[in-house]
Image (spheres, helix red, strand yellow):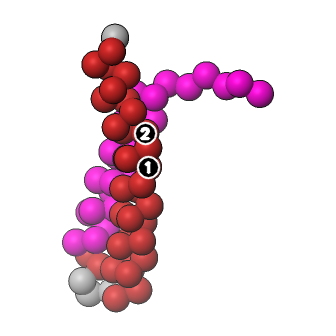
Amino acid sequence: MNQEFDIKALSEKISAMKQNAMELQATGAFFPALDRNIARILASLKMLEINITDAAELDTRSA
C-alpha cells in the first residue's frame, strides 16, 4: 500500500490547475455561478499548494 510519487510533478500539476482556474476566473465576472465555483476551486487548490507545493520546496532544499 505504500506508493511512491513524484512530489515535484504533483506540484507542477497543481500550478497548472491554478493557472487554468485563474484564466477562467477572468471570464467569471460575466457569469456569477462560474465565479463562485472558481473561488471554491482556488480555495481547494490553495490547500493542495500548502500540502504538496510547500513540501516539494522543502524536499528540494534538503536534496
For mark 2, give the secondary structure.
Answer: helix
Cα gap from disc 2 to disc 1, whole angstroms: 6 Å
Quarter of the figure with residue 28 = bottom left
In the picture, which quadrant includes the C terminus? top left
Residue 11 visible? The answer is no
Extreme residue in the right direction: 1
Q: Is residue 16 on the magenta stretch?
A: yes
34 over 14 or under it: above or below? below
Q: Provide the major secondary structure of the magenta segment.
A: helix
The location of residue 3, given as percent across then percent down, is 67, 25
The location of residue 47, given as percent across then percent down, is 42, 54
Residue beneath disc 1:
48
Identify which residue is drawn at 46% across, 29% down.
Answer: 7
Identify which residue is drawn at 36% across, 56% down.
Answer: 46
Identify which residue is drawn at 43% across, 39% down.
Answer: 52
Give amino acid for label 2: Ile
Give amino acid for label 1: Leu
Quarter of the figure with residue 37 = bottom left
Extreme residue in the top direction: 63
Decide: few, some or many residues near mark 1? Use Cα within 10 Å; few <14, some 14-19, many ≥20.
Answer: some
Decide: few, some or many residues near mark 2? Use Cα within 10 Å; few <14, some 14-19, many ≥20.
Answer: some
Q: Nearer the viewer, residue 6 or 28?
A: 6
In the picture, which quadrant includes the N terminus? top right
Badges 2 and 1: C-beta atoms under 8 Å apart?
A: yes
Residue beneath disc 2:
52
For mark 1, give the secondary structure.
Answer: helix
Q: Is residue 14 on the magenta stretch?
A: yes
16 over 55 or under it: above or below? below
* Relative side of 3 to 34, left or right: right
Q: Which residues are magenta?
A: 1-26
Rendered image: mark on residue 60:
none
